[in-house]
Amino acid sequence: MIKYPFPLLSPSSGDRAAAEGAAAENNATNVAEQKPSFDELIKDDKYKAEYEATLAAERERWTKETAEKARQEGLTAEQRNVEELAAAKARLQELEQAQTKAQLKAAATEALAAKNIPTTFAEMLIGADATATKAQTTAFAETFNAAVNAAVEARLAGTTTPKAGNAAAAQDGVTSAFLARNPGLTI
């Protein structure tokens, strides 16, 4: 028999049986929760189609890479240098375009903010160059402000505001409107 240093932590015979039963139950649960094998998954048409599509894409990528490596091996050092230079120029052009786009977006955002228009429209207003961006931003600001003013005027149409200094007349108008809706009330 094993002596435990802390008698309260020593398992009794009933505790051992319960622990063994729990372990058996956990094993049964783990068997049920195990993921299906690859062979089992491939039997399902959905997974099989996905697997075949992925496999075809990877084969195509591998074939292209292999063909490119073979082509690269057949090039002379001068031809490789020319290709590397062309690739570097293309990458430089991409970076310059990205920088130009960022500058134009910043200019459009600044112009919209100066005219109190939401800056979320800046991305849509980027033109080919700074003058095109400025022209598009100005045209958009005018159209946006006109649309906002038209919407405000349409909402305010038919409502009248009381004139300054005539609070009693305004109160009488409100009171008479209230009394008209509630005929049983008197003041």
Image (tube, rainbow, N blue to C red):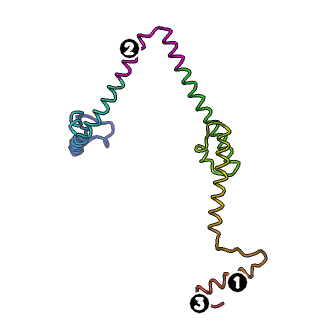
| Residue designated by label 1 | 172
> Mark 2: which secondary structure?
helix
Q: CA distance from mark 3 to mark 2?
A: 96 Å
- The prevailing secondary structure element of the residues shown in magenta is helix
3 inside magenta stretch: no
Determine whether 28 is above or below 149 in the image: above
Who comes first in sequence, dot 3 or dot 2? 2
Tag shown at residue 161: none
Report the residue at 27% width, 37% height from top. Answer: 49
Q: Position of residue 9 (x, y in %)?
A: 31, 41
Residue type indicated by callout 3 = Pro
Where is residue 179? Give x, y as percent: 62, 86
Q: Is residue 8 above or below residue 77?
A: below
Q: Earlier in the sequence, mark 3 or mark 1?
A: 1
Residue shown at 77%/79% (left/top)?
166
The residue type indicated by label 1 comes to Asp
Tell me the quadrant of the picture where the C terminus can be found. bottom right
Work out whether residue 149 or residue 52 is closer to the camera in this orientation and state it.
149
Q: Residue at x 50, y 16 (%)?
A: 83
User: What's under tag 2, amino acid-wise?
Assistant: Ala
Going from the N terminus, do you reach mark 1 or mark 2 first? 2
145 or 115, which lies in front?
Answer: 145
- The residue indicated by pointer 3 is 183
> Residue beneath label 2, please?
70
Instruction: Check contact, mark 1 vs mark 2: CB within 8 A.
Output: no
- Is-magenta flag for residue 72? yes
Give the extent of the magenta segment. 62-86
